[in-house]
Image: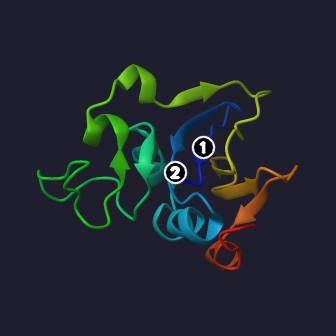
Amino acid sequence: MGTRSIIGLKNIDGTYETVYCHWDGYPSHNGLILAKNYTTEALVRDLISFGDMSSLKALARPKGVSHTYDSSEPGVTIYYHRDRGESWENTKPKILATDEDPHQEEYCYIWDCPAGHWLFKGHREKEFKKLTEESAAQWGDDE
């Protein structure tokens, strides 16, 4: 069973651009990967530019040409469209208005462009908190 998450960014105009990630959404996994590896707006935009993902890894782009869903390069994110050939229309990033809550899954991770850092919350929480390597590492799988 997957621990689903939303990964995205909050633009300066207040809109959200988000993608879905099926596996390992808890802070001690996806949160830690985001906090360690996706530390600038440019890196986050590149990460979400490929759309919904099966599993998040430290790299968004493969180094070679052999990366697929069935034969993935170690440490490379697996996307539904790029790596599994699923429809772009069904897997492309979603743009949400400023008054829509981007939190639809067990966990939600948002890069706050104006502030320049990650925010996160679990489905039981009302408010976003700042995500750091330390805050992500202290969470367990069952939070």
Residue at image location 51% in from the left, 48% down from the top? 22
The x and y percentages for residue 133 are 61, 75
Residue 37 vs residue 9: left or right? Answer: left
Residue at image location 13% in from the left, 57% down from the top? 64
Q: Which is more foreground, mark 2 or mark 1?
A: 1
- Residue 97 occupies quadrant: top right
SS of the residue under disc 2: helix
Which residue has dot 1 on it?
Answer: 9
**By what rule are the colours in the image chosen?**
rainbow
Circles 2, 1 touching at the beta carbon (< 8 Å)? yes
Q: Please, what is the three-letter code of the amino acid marked with disc 2?
A: Glu
Q: Nearer the viewer, residue 56 or 117?
A: 56
Quarter holding the N terminus is bottom right
Quarter holding the C terminus is bottom right
Mark sitting on residue 41: 2
- The image shows residue 38, relative to residue 51, as above or below, that is below
Residue at image location 39% in from the left, 65% down from the top? 58
Q: CA distance from mark 2 to mark 1?
A: 8 Å
The x and y percentages for residue 87 are 34, 24
Q: Earlier in the sequence, mark 2 or mark 1?
A: 1
Q: Nearer the viewer, residue 98 or 136?
A: 136
- Residue 62 occupies quadrant: bottom left
Q: Nearer the viewer, residue 35 or 41?
A: 35
Decide: few, some or many residues near mark 2? Use Cα within 10 Å; few <14, some 14-19, many ≥20: some
